[in-house]
Image: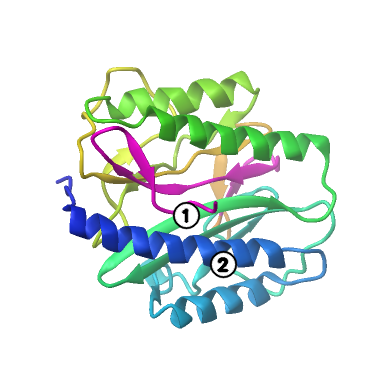
Amino acid sequence: MISIKTEEEIEIMAQNGKMLAKIMKELAAMAQPGITTNEINKVAEDLIFKYKGTPSFKGYNGFPAALCCSVNDQIVHTPPSDRVLKEGDILSLDLGMKYNGYHSDMAITVPIGEVSSEALHLIRAVRKSLKRGIKKIRPDVTVGDISNTIQRHLEGQGLGIVKELCGHGIGKNLHEDPQILNYGKRKKGIKIKKGMVLCLEPMATMGSEEIKKEADGFTYATQDGSLSAHFEHMIAVTEKGSRVLTSLE
């Protein structure tokens, strides 16, 4: 069942999303050569508590931390560790916070120091695909219309689309209906309605679309070891289109 939020609920989620974006901005600035992902996670959790929230991910399906820190070929859901980030890595940060009964969720991929031109192309293309997907959101378009918009941009940039993972609705639960794939056909699927709150999260690779689950039981990584990137925003559907609730600007 798809949850339609009231204006009051959306304002609570907007407040949450604004705080989450501020936290993410601080974490992105920390992501430099020589730091460990455990150190970034510690700051993420401290900031969430500072804002009177709780980490959405910690304990979710047994996940041990507040922040997902996926490096290079790791796509999503990587627990933080003593891994030291080094020049040329790319790091995907995925973070959620529960505040006043509602969840927020967002993700970014950042370069660590100087990275290759191929890595920059990947990051920019996935970020752009998210922007295009958001621009497509408005009442009466279908989920397939949004998914197809993301797909066409990623494929046009020569990237592999991660098809086994997807975006989702969000609210009192971290993951709600509908699922929003990063590929699809126009005019297919449910119609978008005012009051929905959605998380779009394109994930793409420099190589194969095939993915694998790593031995830690959480991390999804590329099968061929190619780089991957991941971006996510939380968006409310309005009468006129979309309202990004996790804007970094």
Q: Residue at x 69, y 63 (%)?
A: 29
Q: Secondary structure at mark 2?
A: loop
Q: Residue at x 44, y 43 (%)?
A: 165
How far from the left and from the top, in percent, is residue 3?
Answer: 17, 49
- The answer to whether 10 appears left or right of 89 in the picture is left
Give whichever of 235, 164 is nearer the camera.
235
Q: Which residue is mark 2?
A: 79
Instruction: Identify which amino acid the numbered label 2 is placed on.
Output: Pro
Can residue 38 be seen here?
yes
Q: Can you tell which mark lies on residue 114?
A: none
How far from the left and from the top, in percent, is residue 40?
Answer: 64, 72
Residue mark closest to the camera, 1 vs 2: 1
How far from the left and from the top, in percent, is residue 158?
Answer: 65, 23
Label 1 or label 2, whichever comes before in sequence order: 2
Q: Residue at x 27, y 26 (%)?
A: 142
Magenta segment boundaries in residue numbering: 220-249
Name the quadrant containing residue 83: bottom right
Q: Which residue is mark 1?
A: 106
Q: Is residue 175 above or below residue 130?
A: below
Give whichever of 84, 233 is nearer the camera.
233
Instruction: Identify which amino acid the numbered label 1 is placed on.
Output: Met
- Is residue 209 inside the magenta stretch? no
Q: Residue at x 30, y 53 (%)?
A: 170
